[in-house]
Image: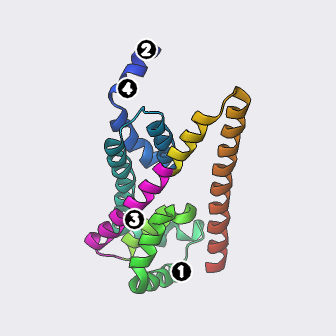
Amino acid sequence: MDPGFLMGLIAEYTYIIIAPAALALGPIVGLAAGVLLRLDVLALIPTCLALATGELGGDILWYWLGRRYGDTFVARFGRYVGVTEEAVSSAKKLFENHHDMIIFSSKLTSGLGFGSVIMFTAGLSRVPFRRYMMLNIAGQFLWTAGLISIGYFLGHIYLKVGNAFEKVALFALIVLIVASLIGFGRYLRNRLSQETL
């Protein structure tokens, strides 16, 4: 395939590509979009809409899977992934009392690495879909604004950095920060799963 043709497709369908990329890759796409906004490659409103569409689409998918297949999954495969029916019933009780705070804070923190589990549990717990979406949309607005702002700031720093060595060092620092956040999220997820067992 001709690279020029591929670049032309990407340039023409950029915002359509952002939505599934945000669904698959999550916060990294928001950060990259913020950098591209600073470099004047993207426009603000279509970028925000594409990011929100992708991430909210993932939230709807996880909710639907939890609502439709949650109980069956736990009964058949829960013991293989460390999920017991007792843990699910205690999670349901927790969701009954605090689902607003759990869903909203999970959206703002991107679940600290286990957002999909929280959205799945919301469906499993039968949180009303309308309430679920209102909380997700409110959290998504703040989450998208935060990611784009951080990316925009990083893009600004990139433009201010002069030579190639400084740009490579800045890129390495960003990769290190993202890897640390991912590692911290996994640590918290493992710790919470050990405490529930």
Density class for disc 1 (Cα within 10 Å; few <14, some 14-19, many ≥20) is some
Which label sits on residue 87? Answer: 1
Secondary element at image label 4: helix
Side (left or right) of 158 relative to 43:
right
Q: CA distance from mark 2 to mark 3?
A: 38 Å
Q: CA distance from mark 1 to mark 2?
A: 53 Å
Q: Residues at badges 4 and 2 in contact (C-beta under 8 Å)?
A: no
Secondary element at image label 2: helix
| Sequence-wise first label, 1 or 3 | 1
| Sequence-wise first label, 4 or 2 | 2
Which quadrant, please, contains the N terminus? top left
Q: Residues at badges 2 and 3 in contact (C-beta under 8 Å)?
A: no
Q: As shown in the figure, which amino acid type bears the numbered disc 4?
A: Ala
Q: Is residue 73 in view?
A: no
Residue 143 x/y as whole percent? 44, 59
- Tell me what residue is drawn at x 44 percent, y 42 percent: 21
Mark 2 = which residue? 4
Secondary element at image label 1: helix
Mark 3 = which residue? 139
Q: As shown in the figure, which amino acid type bears the numbered disc 1?
A: Ala
Q: CA distance from mark 4 to mark 3?
A: 29 Å
Q: CA distance from mark 1 to mark 3?
A: 26 Å
Q: As shown in the figure, which amino acid type bears the numbered disc 3?
A: Gly
Density class for disc 4 (Cα within 10 Å; few <14, some 14-19, many ≥20) is few
| Sequence-wise first label, 4 or 3 | 4
- Tell me what residue is drawn at x 42 percent, y 21 percent: 7
Q: CA distance from mark 4 to mark 1?
A: 47 Å
Question: From the viewer's perspective, is the residue at label 1 or at label 3 nearer?
Answer: 3
| Sequence-wise first label, 1 or 2 | 2
- Tell me what residue is drawn at x 37 percent, y 20 percent: 8
Q: Nearer the viewer, residue 21 or 157?
A: 157
